[in-house]
Image (tube, rainbow, N blue to C red):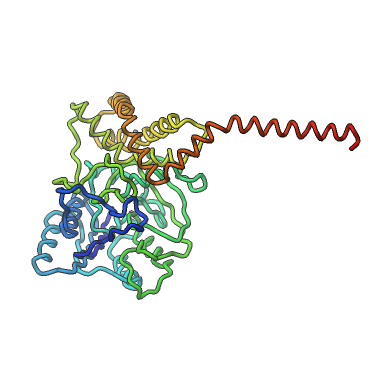
Amino acid sequence: MLSLYFNSRITEQSLIPDRIDSGWFYPVTYPQRVGTGSLSQYAVLLKTIESYAVFKFDTVIFNITIDFIDSQIEEELKKLITDNYSANKIIIRFTRPSTLDEWKKDVAEVSSLIEKNSPVLVVMNHDHPFIDYTPDVFNAVVEKVFPKSGNNFGKALYYSHAPEVISSVINGRSRTKYMRQSGGIYARDITDRWVVSIWVMTIETLGHILSREMCSGSSYMGRIDWAGVEYDQLTLTTYVFPREFFKHFDGYGHITGMRLISDISTAKSTVLQFPGDDDTNGIVDFYYQRWIDCFLLAVRDALRKETPSFASTNNIFKKAIEESLELFRIGYLEADVVAGLIHERRISALEGALRSHIYYFGNLLFESIKTDILLIDGDGFYKFKNLIKRYMPSLLLRILKIIVTHLKNVRRAKESGV
């Protein structure tokens, strides 16, 4: 049964300063349209905690440090959690580990509270709310990746940053490419010096990760993926399911300038609402937005990966869309049938309607993607590709003529005895 290990520190400071040399897509990491306003870290924390209440957990542990905490805030958080959470054990502490030694000590204590080999939703951010319209699919995926009868040590299931993770499934390098497992889950073995903090894993796996950390035990370490923290060639098996379960509250403006992906920062509730089963147009529109949210970055990255290429841009674009639709069928259509949201006989019709809908907006999608690529790679990228396509045939012919001429000259030289 799934448990929750939630850790966060809330401050009144900007988490990521705006800098021209930040390395993100724009110097303003998460640009916002004027007039939309922004919520405080504490307000986002409340939304995130509220969104997790849809799950029935075995053990729930909250470690929350709030720089401006008072008795009213403590009571508000305690009430929100105890009134809404269904769990066998609930522990709320207003302090969070902040050094490697503290993390190791806390995880060792937690190990005695959570059943060995069972999955844990490890949360180290305040701003990754659950947004899916049913918890059933996530629960089913967790059960498949972490079976009670299996050895679950060393497994790590991504639960957030879906567009980036799905792109790595579709566009990953051949040596580390994800391979499809039963149930539409993708897996790969990795050996790395860096980890992320958006995984479901066993508490034993988390303890193992900390044991391979190479920083000083007393150095500040807000999360396991804290800047500058490295691990000693850590080997894990990571898992991905092609669906968006949790979402970064501020979106993905750090890696894209496209504004087609859903923005939940102004929504009343982070949790999506599925249209009625009899509303075909509404369902197709709803699925279209899910496709954009999960797969548009994968299509963009496919175009970047294949350029320069002898294949036409049109063919690369269509191939990426078709591959994304295969994963969409697994992650949404087939999963929603199992969850009882749509009937199996409707899959083909909905898939066909969605495919048509995507290509109807194909040019608009491509223009947005192309702009993103140009801003990332520069127009020289496209110029180089076009030059190759334009001049490669004549260049190959010239090279062939030079080779033939050289061979003729060699033969003449031999015949003349020179």
Residue at the farthest bottom position: 218
Question: Against 279, is 265 above or below?
Answer: below
**Residue 264 location, x and y as percent?**
20, 46
Q: Residue at x 39, y 46 (%)?
A: 376
Number of numbered labels in the structure image: 0
Q: Quadrant of the C terminus?
A: top right
**Residue 234 location, x and y as percent?**
46, 61
Left or right of residue 35: residue 360: right
Q: Residue at x 87, y 35 (%)?
A: 414
Between 66 and 332, the residue placed more toward the observer is: 66
Between 355 and 409, the residue placed more toward the observer is: 409
Location of residue 200 by image quarter? bottom left
Residue at the farthest left position: 72
Residue at the farthest right position: 417
Between 297 and 189, the residue placed more toward the observer is: 297
Location of residue 14 by image quarter? bottom left
Left or right of residue 58: residue 239: right
Between 37 and 161, the residue placed more toward the observer is: 37
Question: Against 329, is 150 above or below?
Answer: below
Q: Residue at x 38, y 40 (%)?
A: 298
**Residue 89 location, x and y as percent?**
20, 61
Left or right of residue 111: residue 313: right
Question: Against 108, is 324 above or below?
Answer: above
**Residue 223 location, x and y as percent?**
32, 64
Question: Against 408, is 153 above or below?
Answer: below
